[in-house]
Amino acid sequence: MVVGMSGGVDSSVTALLLKRQGYDVVGVFMKNWDDTDENGVCTATEDYKDVAKVATKIGIPYYSVNFEKEYWDRVFKYFIAEYKKGRTPNPDVICNKEIKFKAFIDYANQLGADYVATGHYADLKRDEDGRMHLMRAKDQNKDQTYFLSQLDYHQLDKVLFPLAGYTKPEIRQIAEEAGLATAKKKDSVGICFIGEDGHFREFLSQYIPAQPGNMETVDGKVVGHHMGLMYYTIGQRRGLGLGGNKKSNAPWFVIGKDIKKNILYVGQGYENEHLYATHLEASDIHWVDDVVSRYEYDFHCTAKFRYRQKDVGVTVHLSEDQQKVTVTFDDPARAITPGQAVVFYDGEECLGSAIIDRAYNHDHLCQYV
Amino acid sequence: MSEVYFDNAATTPMTKPVIDEMMKQMTDTWGNASTGYSYGRHSKLVLENSRHIIAQSINAKDEEIIFTSGGTESDNTAVIQTALTRKRLGKHIITTAIEHEAILKPMHYLESLGFDVTYLPVDENGNISLADFKAALRDDTILVSIMMGNNEVGSRMPIHEIGEILKDHQAWFHTDAVQAYGLLPIDVEADHIDMLSTSAHKLNGPKMVGFLYRREGVNFPSFVRGGDQETKRRAGTENVPAIAAFAKAVSIDTPEEKQRRQERYYHFKQLIVKRLTDAGVAFEVNGQLDPNNLNHVLNLWFKGISTYVMQTDLDLAGYAVSGGSACTAGSIEPSHVLTAMYGKDSPRIGESIRISFGALNTEDEVNGLVDAIIKIVNKLKNVKGVED
């Protein structure tokens, strides 16, 4: 049994629970990002030290494996390419698909593991035919199926999510009672190349030259300047530097981008009509298992189009080649963001996801990239 | 599960006679050797007796031995203090691309101070060429630092030939003999060596002790500033029990014993290579199978099997081998030695392990290791990846 250990409390308790259940557990730390500073210290060091402390406390061997190249090629290049297009990608979704549940699982198999476990909050159910279904975790607040939604049932076949039935406070309590060094460690942001302090703009500017330009209303009125379109995301309120005006004191929001003209569109009011969409188009579709045989090409289900959002009712229409999906909302949805995943659910089951390309308000294309 | 140790190039266990000696001296000989009363005189006596044993082992004079904290300090002292002391005579230094970090990092530091360092390349066997060396040598060369034998692939450098060339040149000749000292007879006079670094824990001695030999007339101030110990060449109170234990390890490792070890390890290497070949394992030796190399090191490339997998699988099977040096987050740094030998794009860099033998390894253990490797290789043939 190989457990992916990040040095956080969730994966620490995962290893502990499995060890208590009598499994032969091996802890493996994945190093996906080289962030060695000028003094030769990589910030992954502290996390690895925590893995060492916890593994020693539990009494399991631990190792480190390096997937920096795989991460760079398959996750980071995608991440940068998406930002260059003005989109807001979700690297964790891709990291799970390409690294944690692909390169890492292959590595664990080479170590002779029968199962691989991670500290994700999600559940799995095997049906009568032996196929795996991805289910939401008991702790709906922490449910991470959103990030796992691009996996398929093959990848999940030999996976365990031991935290499925626990809430986060319970996990922290177990860690504390067991005296694990990570019991009180703060949750990470998840994205391994963005430090805790999150100097995100500075980080991004190392890879993509920032091109400042105008902030305009949809009527073409210049109301300010932006620092580079990549720094903004649809629905963003903070950091625009715009105050109220004579007409209205309502706050300003990012409502769209025009990459060609390098314009950031902004509008006033949380309820600004330009932030609302009736349907969206998405591609890069991944189903956990075939949906067409189950629901055909058109079906009603629920969806999330960002993490930690309540499900909304949607009607899904799949193109004949299953390469594109049109998702129509039961009620207009706010701040649809190209590059993010739209994740589909049938009750407690996560069906899969697609990456959002465009949003529409009836037949009108929203200015979302 | 029994655990078998095959990483003796990293460090070796202390053997019983060495432990006994250290225990005895820790009990009896704890006085400061620089003091003028009986405790000090007793420590001084043990210290100087140890120095004599060690000096004899390389055909040096007693006063040419400086005890240090080990290989890294000896290397740092030799490289940095030579450069700083002799900078008026020139700024050029010659070394090789496959030195230990304890040489390479000081070289990088000297480059940052304006010194000009030539790194001699190596061929696929891990050997430098004398022609390259001669071509690199300049009138303003002040230091040549070339290891006696390599820690990753065991290749030997032409120390005698270089010593001959340099005996009439201003450059001081330093050699890092940390790996070689336990296996090769060394004669600093015959080889015209000016400075030589060793470490006790590579030959069953304690850690944090070693020596720097410096030829009479080769003068530089202490790298560590402080008291006047080691005739002002190395500040800090001598660790007499550790030094005595080091001398004990050296006295056990006689020239005849070194010869026996070289032959025995070469036999282990041949045995491993033959059995892996017979079993149809896809592998190659990194470097050369040559009885004149440092035979305690065998570096193998298992084609298509990542270093992480092989090292971890072997550890889970109870065998400790090296996958290379790890960064502080545990991930393995690409080997600069294999890179120098095969280029940075060679698959060998991510798919090799180093097996290194010590005085305590038996042929049964070697056979057990080969069994484990064959089992792992066969198991991996049947693993289907998600990637495929």
Image: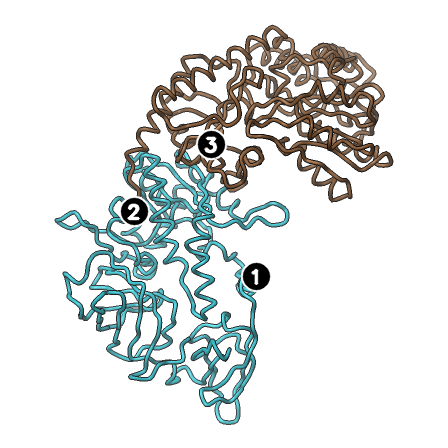
Horizontal side of B182 relative to A170 (left or right) equals right
Q: Residue furthest bottom?
A: A247
Q: Chain of mark 1?
A: A
Element class at badge 1 = loop
Residue at 80 percent of width and 25 percent of height: B233
Between discs 1 and 2, the one toward the N terminus: 2
- Please tell me how crowded label 3 is: few (under 14), some (14-19), or many (20+) other residues with Cα within 10 Å: many
| Residue A170 image position (x, y, % from top left) | 34, 51
Q: Amino acid at mark 2?
A: Pro
Q: Chain of mark 2?
A: A
Please give the label number shown on residue A260.
Answer: none
| Residue A361 image position (x, y, % from top left) | 32, 82
| Label 2 – label 3 distance at C-alpha | 35 Å
Specify how the rendered protein is coloured: by chain
| Residue A334 image position (x, y, % from top left) | 35, 77
Badge count:
3
**Chain letter of the brown region:** B
| Residue B55 image position (x, y, % from top left) | 73, 13
Please give the label number shown on residue A206.
Answer: 1
Q: Which residue is mark 2?
A: A162
Chain A shade in the render: cyan
| Label 1 – label 3 distance at C-alpha | 34 Å
Please give the label number shown on residue B352.
Answer: 3
Depth check: give the residue in front, B152 or A225: B152
Q: Note whether B278 is above or below A368 in the view shown.
A: above
Residue at 31 percent of width and 58 percent of height: A150
Q: Is residue A56 visible?
A: no
Horizontal side of B27 relative to B91 (left or right) equals left
* Displayed quadrant of residue B10: top right
Residue at 68 percent of width and 14 percent of height: B186
Q: Note whether A62 is above or below A200 in the view shown.
A: above
